[in-house]
Amino acid sequence: MTPDKRSDALPALVGGAAARMRTVPNTPGTPRRTIRVSDVLWDAAAAKAAERGESLSDVLRRALERYVKRK
C-alpha cells in the first residue's frame, strides 16, 4: 500500500466504513506491524482466538477498527 492510499484509508475508517471493509489478505502487499504486549496477554488472546476458530490478526484488526470508530 502506498503512503497516499494509507492516508486515504483513515478518513474512511473514521467515517464508519470500517464495517464494510474486507478482511486484510495475508499477502506480501499487506504491511506488517509490531506491537509490544506481555506474553501472558498474547497467549491468552491467542488461545481464545483459536477456540473461536479465528486468527489473532483478525481479532486485533477488528479491535483497532472499533477503536478508530469510537468518538
Image (cartoon, helix red, strand yellow):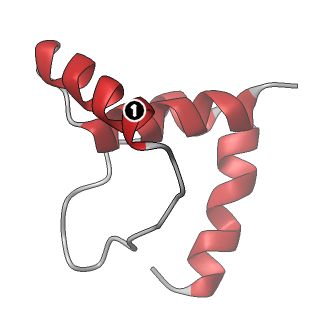
**The furthest residue to the right:** 71
Q: Is residue 51 left or right of residue 22?
A: left
Return the x and y of residue 29 as percentages of the image width and height.
29, 78
Q: Is residue 7 left or right of residue 21?
A: right
Q: Residue at x 40, y 74 (%)?
A: 31
> Hey, which quadrant is residue 57 in on the image?
top left
Assess disc 1: are there few (<14), some (14-19) or many (≥20) residues with their C-alpha within 10 Å of its C-alpha. Answer: few
Q: Residue at x 19, y 27 (%)?
A: 54
Q: Is residue 65 above or below residue 12?
A: above
Q: Residue at x 72, y 30 (%)?
A: 69
Q: Is residue 43 left or right of residue 40?
A: left
Return the x and y of residue 2 as percentages of the image width and height.
52, 86
How many numbered circles does the render carry?
1
Q: Is residue 37 above or below residue 19?
A: below
The one nearer the camera, 32 or 43, is: 43
Residue occupied by mark 1:
40
Q: Quadrant of the N terminus?
A: bottom left
Q: Residue at x 52, y 59 (%)?
A: 35
Q: Is residue 27 above or below residue 17?
A: below
Return the x and y of residue 70 as percentages of the image width and height.
78, 25
Secondary structure state at the residue bearing disc 1: helix
The one nearer the camera, 43 or 15, is: 43
Q: Is residue 10 left or right of residue 46?
A: right
Q: Is residue 3 above or below residue 17?
A: below
Q: Quadrant of the C terminus?
A: top right
> Hey, which quadrant is residue 50 in on the image?
top left
Q: Amino acid at mark 1?
A: Val
